[in-house]
Amino acid sequence: MEPVHTNAKHATTNRVVTSILKIRISHCESTRSFEPDQRRNFRQGESQNGLKPSSICGTPCSVMGIAGYCSSVRRTIPIWYGSCRWLNPFRRVGVRANADIPRDAVQARAFGAEGIGLCRTDHMFFAKERIPYMREMILAENEPQRRAALDKLLPMQRDDFFGLFQAMDGLPVTIRTLDPPLHEFLPNAEELRSTIRALESATGDHKDEIEHTKKVLAGVESLHELNPMLGHRGCRLGITYPEITGMQSRAIFEAAVQAKRAGLNPKPEIMIPLVGSKREFDDQETVVHRTAEEVFAACGVRVDYMIGTMIELPRACIMAGEIAQDAEFFSFGRA
């Protein structure tokens, strides 16, 4: 779900848009010249860059319909961006992008994104050089083991965040802390059972490999939930394992300090996912603030930041008034 990003206290809005093939604008009686690339007069029925607005005019108008999807992103987004620049004098919302890695952020800004509306940090962990450390953290038997694995992930996350701040210099970057259920980072249980059976029937000594696979299988089975999308995920992971939120917050603030020292203007916004009550938000907010102060004190540099959440649960909608007492922004999506 692409989020609508709203300041919880000032009700300003940024909407993420993915692709548009057709825009129809009505309530217009006259025509007007628009200029991004060249001055030209558009009348009803005319088209530009493959789009066919019913009319483009200078009088107040509203977008009545947006429809269509083009599978070629390379073709669609430049068309959409170039054509929607016509609407700049009238629009009241900003447009941010979903971007999880620096390369995507660079491309998003080139297409005109006014920031990152959602960076899903969990996507960073699926890279082949990172997933072993993520699994090591998940299968850790105690907090010291878990922290040891997180220490290996910290510099990787920090580098990613620095790249995002570099690409979005001066623009807001909303970073969501770990959200999915932990089992998503582990192998499939049935595949593990098949591997164990194959190893047990194979010739040679596979004792260590069998024991390791059984350990992973036990971890997968222990994380099994009937409804994992509304289970132990989102802020509940951070509440159970505050060291995870701590590591991600440290990576964000160390990257922001690094960016500021490099002459950039980082604007981090930390999103706490799947919040359903003010108490849940406050718990994670405390961890983030504490980590921020530790980093700023150690580095002698401060960076402005915001902490907010995504309203993606029915309960969160009902409790939004209370959550907004502390949250500095809301994004809207779905679980």
Image (cartoon, helix red, strand yellow):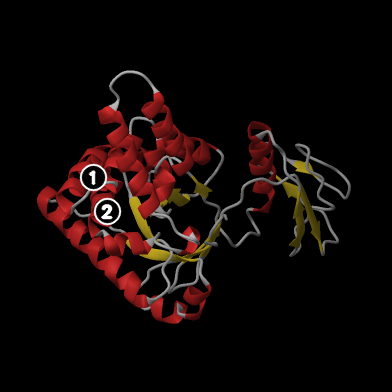
Q: Which of 106 and 289 is in front in this view?
A: 289
Residue where numbered disc 2 is placed: 244
Q: How far across and how far down the image is residue 301, in percent?
A: 17, 51
Q: How far across and how far down the image is residue 69, in percent?
A: 72, 44
- Determine the CA span between mark 2 and mark 1: 7 Å
Which quadrant of the figure contains the N terminus? bottom right
Is residue 291 visible in this depiction of the protein?
yes
Is residue 134 visible in this depiction of the protein?
no
Q: In this view, does 4 lie above or below 205?
A: below
Task: Work out which residue is located at the far top of the displayed protein and give it.
Answer: 204
Residue at 43%, 64% in the rendered image: 274
Question: SS of the residue at dot 1?
Answer: helix
Residue where numbered disc 1 is placed: 150
Q: What residue type is labelled 2?
A: Ile
Q: Say left or right for 16 vs 177.
A: right
Task: Work out which residue is located at the far right of the displayed protein and give it.
Answer: 45
Would you say the residues marked 2 and 1 are in contact, meaning their CB atoms lie under 8 Å apart?
yes
Residue at 51%, 47% in the rendered image: 98
Q: Residues within 10 Å of mark 2 (few under 14, many from 20)?
A: many
Number of numbered tags placed on the structure image: 2
Q: How far across and how far down the image is residue 70, in percent?
A: 72, 39
Question: SS of the residue at dot 2?
Answer: helix
Q: Say left or right for 254 vs 81.
A: left
Q: Between disc 2 and disc 1, whose residue precedes?
A: 1
Q: How far across and how far down the image is residue 61, in percent?
A: 75, 63
Residue at 37%, 71% in the rendered image: 327
Q: Which mark is residue 324?
A: none
Q: Residues within 10 Å of mark 1 (few under 14, many from 20)?
A: many
Q: In which quarter of the image is residue 225?
A: bottom left
Q: Which of 173 and 84 is in front in this view?
A: 173
Q: Which amino acid does label 1 sit on?
A: Leu
